[in-house]
Amino acid sequence: MRIPALEVVGLAGGYGDTQVLRGVELAVQPGTVTALLGANGAGKTTLLKTIAGTLRPHAGSVSVGGVDVTAQKAHTRARAGVCMIPEGRGIFPNLTVAENLRMATPPWRKGEPYDPALEAFPALAERLHQRAGSMSGGQQQMLALSRCFLSQPDVVLLDEVSMGLAPKVIDEIFESLRQLAERGVALLVVEQYVHRALEMADFVHLMSRGSIGFSGTPDQIDEEQLQREYLGESDSTETTNQTSAVSGQQSKVSDEQ
Ligand code: ATP
């Protein structure tokens, strides 16, 4: 059996005493894009933060390439190959593109050329000396995503990277994400554009009230039920049957591949 690039087992966590995640189980294989979908408040961002190590779990484990990193802090996990791109751009608007790229290069890759990022996003190569804040939203997001190309991670966690961008720019960004997957990187993608996410993803996890209700392939999803039970309204309301949004039985990705 292949070792998943990322494996989460029985993960519980949240903010202080407030529990958000409840027994989350998921696996992401190398070279695949996995979409994480769910209503507002389902716990998607909380899960990404807990995987990245910026939030401590109450229980359960996170493994990267078969190594348990649960006890590691965020910067150690980053060095172990986890790159998180949080919601919002996270760049330095007053610095130039080149200066941002230097800041985004992790210490263990300092001195290496920016080529991987510039090949993925040629628009940045033409703007190396431009102030980042003066670029378009799409170009700023490309700059934020450059970090995933510069640190050469094994696992990339993306939180709503298409937020507020024009459709053409989103296409370009999604294409760059597919390129990352083709290099063997495992991507876990939280995305507001559900249809685009389902088109791009190899696998999908549906999240409701802090747990994963379904894991499988996009073609196993009944979209009407997906909309009604997972995406329809904020997750503060009770859902009755988390697994019935799919045409098949609830399945665990790690068992399928
Ligand atoms: P959204 O798309 O709205 O961001 P989400 O699925 O990413 O939804 P989370 O942001 O993980 O959901 O939020 C899950 C729950 O945790 C929500 O009830 C939210 O109010 C709560 N929460 C989020 N951030 C904090 C925080 N810093 N402190 C306390 N509770 C929080």
Image (cartoon, helix red, strand yellow):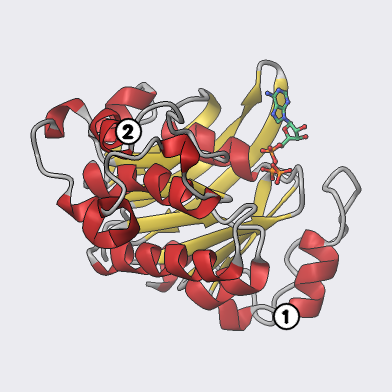
Look at label 2 and name its amino acid. Asn
Residue 29 at what x, y percent from top left? 34, 62
Label drawn at residue 100: 2
3 up-or-down from 110: above or below: below
Tell me whether circle 1 and circle 2 mark residues in contact (CB < 8 Å): no
Q: Nearer the viewer, residue 82 or 220?
A: 82
Left or right of 256? Residue 224 is right
- Give the image quarter of residue 194: bottom right
Look at label 1 and name its amino acid. Asp
Left or right of 69? Residue 53 is right
**Quarter of the image with the C terminus in it:** bottom left
Tell me if residue 84 can be seen. Answer: yes
Q: Quadrant of ligand 1?
A: top right
Cα separation between marks 1 and 2: 42 Å
Residue 216 at what x, y percent from top left? 54, 71
Other-residue count near label 2 (Cα within 10 Å), few / some / many at <14 / 14–19 / ≥20: many
Label drawn at residue 255: none
Q: Is mark 2 within 8 Å of ligand 1?
A: no
* Residue, far top: 16
Tell me if residue 252 can be seen. Answer: no
237 up-or-down from 102: above or below: below
- Give the image quarter of residue 246: bottom right
Left or right of 68? Residue 159 is right
Callout 1: helix, strand or loop? loop
Residue 74 at what x, y percent from top left? 38, 25
Q: Is mark 1 within 8 Å of ligand 1?
A: no
Q: Residue at x 45, y 42 (%)?
A: 85
Earlier-in-chain disc, 1 versus 2: 2
Q: Residue at x 52, y 40 (%)?
A: 48
Other-residue count near label 1 (Cα within 10 Å), few / some / many at <14 / 14–19 / ≥20: some
Q: Residue at x 33, y 33 (%)?
A: 96
Left or right of 122? Residue 144 is right
